[in-house]
Amino acid sequence: MSPAYLDHAATTPMLPEAIEAMTQQLGRVGNASSLHAAGRQARRVVEESREAIADALGARPSEVVFTAGGTEADNLAIKGLYWAREPRRRILISSIEHHGALDPARWLADRQGAEVELLEVDSHGRVHPDTLRAAIERDPESVALVSVMWANNEVGTVQPIRVLASIARDHGIPFHTDAVQAVGVLPVSFADSGAQALTLSGHKVGGPMGVGALLLERGVTPVSVLHGGGQERDVRSGTLDAPAIAGLAAAVEAAAKGQQAQAIRLSALRDDLIRRVRQAVPDVILNGDPVDRLPGNAHFSFPGCEGDALLMLLDAKGVECSTGSACSAGVAQPSHVLLAMGAPAAAARGSLRFTLGHTSTQDDVDRLIEVLPAAVERARRAGLS
């Protein structure tokens, strides 16, 4: 029996459309920066992919800058916008960001003199507009940029991005959003969002690993992080991976087209999972917003359990999921997301994330419920020993 894969937020299997588009290009030679026929063919693939992504996400083709993934796009947005806005020093960033966004901001604080201010969230993991407004209005002229993710990768809470971006825009401050978890799952329009920069990643939307994009509003030019051949508006140098870009575009296009139907299907499956987990483990705690959350996200704290131990017990029974904590040098650390939401350290260490995607079925949920009670009981006994 194949495992029940409940970790789509980490990476989701490639969509058939993406596999086909990428495979068609893999055997072809040609650098998209070359002027001969093979180079022009590669360039055509890249530009048609750029147009498809822009059309699917409510952007202009000129606003799509290809990167090697979400982390690079976050680094380019945060470092690049900060440097472009010097001598402004303040970076306002939510306390529950992915490390792909948090760590560049912290690096700027450690090495470049930036002043990083973590925007507080409520117990559901949401940044309230008044929190951002108050932080800006303390000294608007000193703010270099604002960065708030569209939807949280751990607990699934969806942020009021349009409102937050509007507050920043009213003060003339660039707003960046990491939309890695949102693209293809929620309705995402770059133009309607009000953001000046938006991150997406291939392998979170059914495309290949190692490719992503940063959407940049016209007129917004971050300082480059990579210097070289001047590709991508001279914002991101490097030879373009035409096969991966073709796969990314096919995935974004297919996911966006089927987004509404998929959201309805996954929400129903997720709600069933949440209901049955609560029945199987009555004292379990659901984390994140109970309503305004990603369609495929269910995040729980299991009192008396270590998340890593419970994860491995489930894995041994054919259920693959993620822990709510990061592991560093073999030592479990509490989830910074749950701590920011006010959860005790023990609850933050004893959490698991179950995430559904386009390959998820009722059988996956049934398999989890079948093995979960015994795994929780065993994890709790181990914690007492």
Image (cartoon, rainbow, N blue to C red):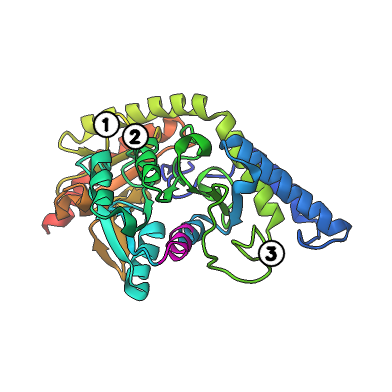
Residue 234 placement (x, y as % from top left): 63, 62
Q: Secondary structure at mark 3?
A: loop
Residue drawn at x 52%, y 37% as measured from the top left: 191
Residue 298 - label = none
Residue type at numbered disc 1: Pro
Query: Disc 3 designates what residue?
Result: 239
Which of the 4 quarters of the picture holds residue 9?
top left
Tell me which segment is drawn in magenta: 77-86
* Labels 3 and 2: the sequence-earlier one: 3
Magenta stretch prevailing secondary structure: helix
Residue drawn at x 79%, y 56% as measured from the top left: 27
Q: Secondary structure at mark 1?
A: loop
Residue type at numbered disc 3: Thr
| For residue 291, side relative to residue 252 (left or right) | left
Q: Nearer the viewer, residue 229 or 385?
A: 229
Q: Nearer the viewer, residue 40 or 28?
A: 40
| For residue 342, side relative to residue 60 (left or right) | left
Q: Within 10 angstroms of label 1, few (less than 14), some, or many (20 or more) residues?
A: few
Residue 22 is at least partly visible in this image: yes
Query: Disc 2 designates what residue?
Result: 293
Q: What separation in Å lies between label 2 and label 1 (alpha carbons)? A: 7 Å
Question: Which of pointers 3 and 2 indicates the residue nearer the eye?
Answer: 3
Q: Are marks 2 and 1 in contact (CB under 8 Å)?
A: yes
Residue drawn at x 51%, y 57% as measured from the top left: 73
